[in-house]
Image: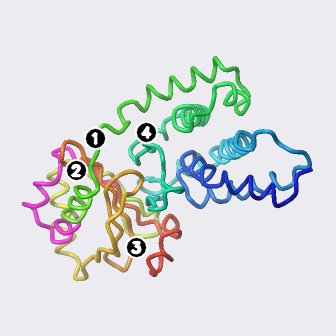
Amino acid sequence: MPSRDEYAADFEAQRPRLLRLGYRMLGSVSEAEDIVQEAWLRWASKVESVDAPAAYLTRIVTRLCLDQLKSARVRRETYIGAWLPEPLMETTEPEETIADDLTLTLMLAMERLSPLERAAFLLHDVFGVALTDIATTLGREPAAVRQLASRARKHVRDARPRFTVDASEADRIARAFFTASREGDADALSALLARDVAIYSDGGGKVIAFRNVVRGIDRALRLFAGLKRKNASMPTLLRTATIDGLPGYVSVDRGDVLQTTALDVRDGRIAAIYIVRNPDKLRHLAAAFDTRSG
């Protein structure tokens, strides 16, 4: 029987990957952490050795996530306003860098998939797991898994990243948008926004947010002009960041609310704006920025 130290070492080697899988499955940092903790408890209680720890732990986390998704879908049906994933900021640590091309836009597209399709797509297309191993995990034949992944691929095809923005340009766009939106500067915003821009705001019913998606540049310009008129306090930029693969920033907004803003940039214009204000989704960031989360 392996020692507890050996079990711990094997698990810690897989932890970043397991957290990434849990987050991509659930769209929640906190839920992914809970899932990985449960996986550790199951792993630590084993009495026999495992030849392939990575495959075994991936199987545990995937199955736990599938169970979690059943209740998560029910909660999201009654969610107040737009639902967005908990924002995940990329780290500068090489061993923890997100090594896939899943942007926030693609994660939202995956919400339309069934849990099994989501699992098959992520495991096969993103994490490179063999079809036979996925079949074991999902309790399906390899041919059925191939079909699940193929259907998922077709559903999310249009949301796959097609435009790359280098770091300096991402920082420039994020800062320019923050300033223009804070000032309600119609000319600057018109130069930044696509004609069919869409604005999503997730407050979860906990803080003020737009209940409905704001679509089109004219409505967006009126929105930012109205916010400028109504509020005496000005938002504060804490830092620019890459948020779920998109350029963006973290700020303290009107009413001392911590928020993240991610920008989907296409052909040099901002096509979508994703704002997370729900304090429950920002707890993992609040301490880092030494501010309250609501």
Badge 3 density bin: few <14, some 14–19, many ≥20, Cα 10 Å: many
Q: CA distance from mark 4 to mark 3?
A: 26 Å
Query: At 70% across and 24% down in the image, what residue appears?
Result: 140
Badge 4 density bin: few <14, some 14–19, many ≥20, Cα 10 Å: some
Query: What stretch of residues is rendered in magenta?
Result: 178-200
Whole-percent x and y of residue 292? 47, 80
- Residue denoted by label 3: 258
| Numbered mark located on residue 163 in the image | 1
Query: Closer to the N terminus: mark 4 or mark 3?
Result: 4
Looking at the picture, the colour scheme in use is rainbow
| Numbered mark located on residue 270 in the image | 2
In the structure shown, which secondary structural element does the residue marked by tag 3 occupy?
Answer: strand
Q: Is residue 40 magenta?
A: no
Is 23 positioned to the left or the right of 88 in the image? right
Instruction: Give, as a three-letter code, the residue at label 1.
Output: Phe
Query: Closer to the N terminus: mark 3 or mark 1?
Result: 1
Q: Are marks 1 and 4 in contact (CB under 8 Å)?
A: no
Instruction: Give, as a three-letter code, the residue at label 3.
Output: Leu
Q: Nearer the viewer, mark 3 or mark 1?
A: 1
Query: Closer to the N terminus: mark 2 or mark 1?
Result: 1
Which quarter of the picture shows residue 131? top right
